């Protein structure tokens, strides 16, 4: 076997193992392909398995059918089990055609070529095998991403349920806010990726409340200023929990800013206007609407008419104009409705709650 040092990819070249007991043939193939692929050679099936163990994985293995000891079909069958991502090509004579076809049908071989094989056909076949290998890698990556998405969805739902489990009045709040925010986002022309970011942020926007004592959240009486200050830290706590997410995926920033107001009167940073990201502007409006329509231990639901009046009255002052307009359009012209909320449903701060925020 040549190239025993087994280096990594040379300039991004795909790694190819050639297996044939004819040294002269291997050398001629090497001269033909050395500039296009990173080549290894072996003169027997057993030597090829050793190369795979020591220097693998390979993108492509090209093996002759007729070799002393282990033939090409047995070799490639073993490779298919130990290194299933390696694309396998079998070289065979016309007399062995049926055996080669059987090997291909059993899945051990991607393609078979008859000997003598024109050099250009061999080169094109290896190139096609490399493309096939890339396709397999892409499919595996896509499958892994889908599994990660399912896992992430479960984590998001779990965190959302954790927050709501600490406060029965929050039950369904994050889901309703998310649904309304997404409807508003669609009205505003958000893209699929932007809507997905908004969806995750909506489901987790109150995650920082795990830091807040349950007594503060459920007390029917007036909170002391220091208790209110603890509650108003929940956007910052939520940001700290999620800030290590990809910076191109601003879920944590949206959560941090969903209680900011356009005139700078919000919290925790007191941001104004253009310093508030679009997702947070949308979420702020959806949050207030559901809050006012929900029951809390310190007041009953104020109803959708009061909520829409609040949004309309403070459009451009507290709430982003475009987000407010999208919300009003949904309820007044599109027939949008929040889910029915019985006593014990969720609620968070509105401007009519006189500073009480849970």
Image: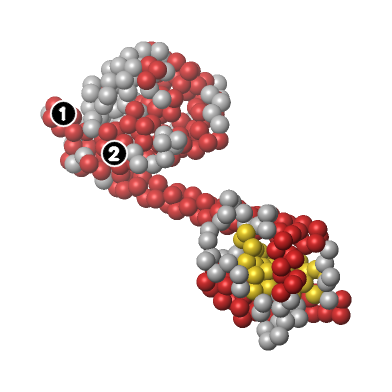
Q: Position of residue 42 (x, y in %)?
A: 64, 74
Residue nearest the observer in this picture, 268 or 81: 81
Question: Quadrant of the rendered structure where residue 318 is?
Answer: top left
Please tell me whether mark 1 sits on a helix, a strand or a loop. loop
Residue drawn at x 68%, y 69% as measured from the top left: 18
View extreme (bottom): residue: 69
For the residue carrying disc 1, how many other residues have a C-alpha within 10 Å: few (<14), some (14-19), or many (20+)?
few
200 relative position to 107: left or right: left
Quadrant (top left/top right/bottom left/bottom right) for the N terminus: bottom right
Q: Position of residue 117 (x, y in %)?
A: 82, 67
| Res. 339 in view | no
Q: Earlier in the sequence, mark 2 or mark 1?
A: 1
Residue drawn at x 35%, y 41% as measured from the top left: 244
- Give the residue number, with chain letter if any, for mark 1: 222
- Give the residue number, with chain letter if any, for mark 2: 240
In the image, residue 67 sits, relative to residue 132, either above or below, namely below
Mark seen at residue 93 = none
Of the two numbered discs 2 and 1 in the rendering, the one whose residue sits closer to the viewer: 2
Residue drawn at x 38%, y 22% as measured from the top left: 276
């Amino acid at each position: 076997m040549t190239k025993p040092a087994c280096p990594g990819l040379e300039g991004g070249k795909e790694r190819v193992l050639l297996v044939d007991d004819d040294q002269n043939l291997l050398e001629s193939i090497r001269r033909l392909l050395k500039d296009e692929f990173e080549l290894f050679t072996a003169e027997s099936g057993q030597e090829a398995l050793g190369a795979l163990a020591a220097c693998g994985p390979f993108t492509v293995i090209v093996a002759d059918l007729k070799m002393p000891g282990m033939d090409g079909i047995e070799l490639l069958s073993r490779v298919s089990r130990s290194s299933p991502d390696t694309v396998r090509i079998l070289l065979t004579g016309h007399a062995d055609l049926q055996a080669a076809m059987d090997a291909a049908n059993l899945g051990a071989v991607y393609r078979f070529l008859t000997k003598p094989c024109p050099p250009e056909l061999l080169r094109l076949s290896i190139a096609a095998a490399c493309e096939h290998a890339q396709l397999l890698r892409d499919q595996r990556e896509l499958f892994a991403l889908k599994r990660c998405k399912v896992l992430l969805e479960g984590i998001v739902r779990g965190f959302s349920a954790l927050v709501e489990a600490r406060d029965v009045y929050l039950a369904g709040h994050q889901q309703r806010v998310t649904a309304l925010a997404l409807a508003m986002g669609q009205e505003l022309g958000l893209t699929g990726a932007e809507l997905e970011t908004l969806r995750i942020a909506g489901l987790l926007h109150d995650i920082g409340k795990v830091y807040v004592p349950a007594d503060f959240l459920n007390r029917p009486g007036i909170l002391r200023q220091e208790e209110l200050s603890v509650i108003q830290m929940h956007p910052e706590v939520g940001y700290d929990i999620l800030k290590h997410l990809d910076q191109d995926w601003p879920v944590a920033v949206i959560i941090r800013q969903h209680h900011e107001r356009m005139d700078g009167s919000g919290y925790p940073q007191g941001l104004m206007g253009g310093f508030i990201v679009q997702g947070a502007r949308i979420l702020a409006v959806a949050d207030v609407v559901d809050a006012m329509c929900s029951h809390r231990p310190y007041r009953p639901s104020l109803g959708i008419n009061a909520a829409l009046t609040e949004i309309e009255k403070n459009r451009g002052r507290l709430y982003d104009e475009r987000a407010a307009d999208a919300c009003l359009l949904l309820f007044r012209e599109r027939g949008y409705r929040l889910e029915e909320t019985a006593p014990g449903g969720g609620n968070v701060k509105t401007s009519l709650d006189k500073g009480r925020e849970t």
